[in-house]
């Protein structure tokens, strides 16, 4: 089948309300906010925007409500140049929303989110041709049955599957056998395996599900991946951080680009870290997504932040 797209993403989008505060208040406290911003976001949708900015032909499959938030999200996807032919518009349904409190002293954020059940995607709503038209499939774990269906289609036709997962979803064990590249949050491998050592946790996951790459993001310290029995660690880039919202999503979008372009694992992690860091320099999940040139300049001259515990047990790129 003709590969019309480099990557297709199946998963979440959201409309974010950002609240900037001088400092996050103590529990039970009260504080004024400096600024309120409405912006598009969501795990897979933001990753697909990053793919487009890096030059990939990109398609997004997801559900969007018909309220103001949904309209903002759809305008963002259209403006980005993402194919939205199979985005499902849900009538009389609000879009997924998030309230994100950003501490201006650090750029760290606290997220409160809600996704109405009327946005749920089911397997029957994803036809094989929607997946087979691409070179790579990127998913999250929220609508587990639907992403399992999409991943099974891709895997059965030799299309690599990348997944972004930050929490344990019921039934996610049925998705993992079809995943080639797992890039999990810092806590997921330990929580999934009940093993305190993240190195051993990644090893167990990779061994059980026979995936090519088992990796985890490490927040301000970069990312680590297990490939062919060897651990690779890529330190983070130090930037003037305004907002960490969406950094992981952009990391995943850049990693998709790296897989499509055939990058080594060292170069893939380095590019993904650079793109994530650049996004932290602006407000919003998609506010600082840059192109390949900006990422390469940061890689060439940027300061790194390393975690010595991870660096001492890995090959450092």
Image (tube, helix red, strand yellow):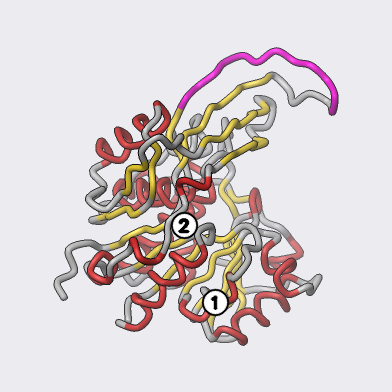
The numbered mark, 1 or 2, whose residue comes first in the sequence reads 1
State which quarter of the image contains the C terminus.
bottom right
Q: Residue at x 53, y 61 (%)?
A: 141
- Label at residue 174: 1
Q: Residue at x 33, y 50 (%)?
A: 292
What predominant SS class does the magenta segment belong to?
Answer: loop
Hey, which residue is sitting farthest left in the picture? 2
Residue 44, placed above or below residue 112:
below
User: In the rendered view, does 285 fall on the left or right side of 236?
Assistant: left
- Label at residue 252: 2
User: Judging from the image, what secondary structure is the residue with disc 2 in?
Assistant: helix
- Label at residue 53: none
Choose top left, top right, bottom left or bottom right for residue 155.
bottom left
Horizontal and vertical percent for residue 307? Answer: 71, 58
Looking at the image, which is closer to me, 139 or 244?
139
Q: Which numbered mark, 1 or 2, is in the foreground of this view?
A: 1
User: In the rendered view, does 314 fall on the left or right side of 4?
Assistant: right
């Amino acid at each position: 089948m003709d590969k019309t797209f480099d990557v297709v993403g199946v998963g979440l989008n959201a409309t974010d309300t950002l609240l900037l505060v001088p400092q996050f208040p103590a529990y039970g406290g009260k504080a004024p906010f400096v600024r309120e911003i409405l912006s598009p976001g969501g795990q897979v949708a933001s990753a697909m925007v990053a793919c487009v900015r890096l030059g990939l032909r990109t398609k997004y499959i997801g559900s969007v409500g018909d309220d103001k938030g949904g309209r903002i999200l759809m305008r963002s996807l259209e403006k980005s140049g993402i194919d939205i032919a199979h985005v499902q518009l849900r009538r009389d349904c609000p879009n997924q929303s998030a309230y994100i409190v950003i501490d201006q002293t650090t750029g760290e954020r606290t997220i409160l989110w809600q996704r109405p059940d009327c946005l749920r995607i089911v397997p029957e709503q994803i036809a094989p041709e929607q997946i087979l038209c691409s070179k790579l499939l990127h998913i999250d774990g929220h609508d587990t049955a639907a992403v399992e269906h999409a991943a099974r289609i891709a895997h059965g036709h030799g299309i690599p599957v990348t997944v972004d997962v930050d929490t344990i979803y019921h039934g996610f064990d049925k998705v993992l056998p079809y995943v080639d590249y797992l890039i999990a949050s810092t806590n997921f491998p330990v929580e999934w395996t009940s093993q305190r050592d993240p190195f051993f946790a990644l090893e167990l996951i990779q061994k059980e599900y026979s995936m090519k790459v088992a990796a985890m993001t490490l927040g301000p310290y970069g990312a680590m991946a297990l490939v062919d029995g060897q651990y690779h660690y890529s330190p983070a880039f130090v930037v003037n951080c305004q907002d960490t919202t969406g950094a992981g999503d952009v990391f995943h979008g850049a990693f998709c680009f790296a897989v499509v372009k055939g990058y080594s694992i060292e170069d893939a992690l380095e590019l993904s870290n650079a793109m994530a860091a650049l996004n932290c320099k602006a407000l919003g999940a998609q506010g600082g997504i840059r192109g390949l040139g900006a990422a390469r300049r940061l890689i060439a001259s940027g300061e790194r932040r390393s975690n010595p515990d991870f660096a001492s047990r890995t090959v450092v790129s």
